[in-house]
Image (cartoon, grey):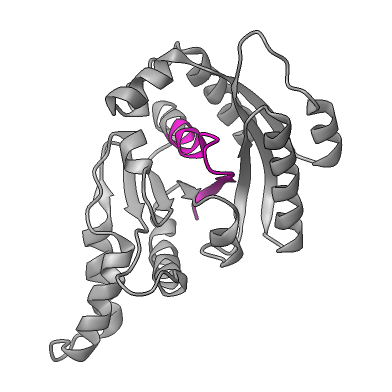
Amino acid sequence: MAFTVAVAGKGGTGKTTIAALLISSLVKQGRQPVLAVDADPNPNLDIALGARIGKTIGELREDLLDAIRKLPPGMTKDDYLEMGIQECLSEGKGIDLLAMGCGEGPRCYCAVNHVLRRCIDRLRGSYPYMVIDNEAGLENLSRRIVRSVDLLVLTGDPSKRGLETVRRLYGLAVEMKISYKKLAIIINRLRNDASIPDFGALRAAVPADHFLALPENSDIAGLAERGAGIGTLPRTNAVAAMMDGFIDNVLK
């Protein structure tokens, strides 16, 4: 069964970049293949990874609705789902990508989440590692697209509001009874010459197993501007090296 990492946080904190950094570190360290799951209805993980999305889970769900009415003789709905999963899985070097997307109807994602959950259940046994980039907040996790995760990562920025949002997300995770074995807090885009205000208070309020502060990084910003994947980031890069050390620490 895959060691599962779920990344969640407030929008705009670099959550998807952090998910891509985690995936890239796993692959560069030989901890592969990784199943990368973009569980945001507006997918961006493909861009951060320099990958290409095939069919989304939302599109598969629409196909399933049509197929139920006209399945060939002898083919079950589960047979069709199995075929559809393979169409949705974008295979790459050490990374296979699955993207949620959304359906065509009213913007309620419950049905798409259900199909995504079934896809993950079928695939996760074939991968040693899985990283899920969730939409902003904790809604996907509250819908139990996975029953439990090995590592829950909550992301934030170093502002007072950003740290308070992390604290509130932790409170929601407890309230929603989200199941995880370890918790990590990653504060992103710290100015190189700055300390994190109220970081001590956050540590006291949130009993995380791991805390990590990533500095602003011009190399990563440049990749984003060019639309290049995180995998092209040199491992000598300060943030990449910090993420490598973080992965080693989590998995030891």
Q: Tell me the quadrant of the picture where the C terminus can be found.
A: top right
In the depicted structure, whether residue 212 falls above or below residue 128: above
In the depicted structure, whether residue 117 falls above or below residue 250: below
Please give the name of the residue rendered at 49% of the width and 16% of the height, measured from the top-left corner.
217
Say if the magenta span includes residue 111.
no
Please give the name of the residue rendered at 61% of the width and 64% of the height, measured from the top-left corner.
142
Q: Position of residue 175 (x, y in %)?
A: 76, 62
Between 169 and 246, the one nearer to me in the picture: 169
Please give the name of the residue rendered at 54% of the width and 50% of the height, measured from the top-left corner.
136
Q: Is 127 left, or right, of 186 in this rendering? A: left
Q: Position of residue 184 (x, y in %)?
A: 67, 38
In the depicted structure, whether residue 84 falls above or below residue 89: below
Between 90 and 2, the one nearer to me in the picture: 90
Between 134 and 116, the one nearer to me in the picture: 134
In the depicted structure, whether residue 92 falls above or below residue 103: above
Say if the magenta span includes residue 15.
yes
Q: Quadrant of residue 125?
A: bottom left
Please give the name of the residue rendered at 16% of the width and 89% of the height, measured from the top-left corner.
70
Q: Is 157 left, or right, of 206 in this rendering? A: left
Q: Quadrant of residue 144?
A: bottom right
**Residue, far left:** 72
Q: Position of residue 199 (x, y in %)?
A: 78, 27
Q: Position of residue 243 (x, y in %)?
A: 54, 25
Q: In this figure, what is the number of numbered marks?
A: 0
The magenta stretch spans which residues?
Answer: 1-23
**Residue, far top:** 193
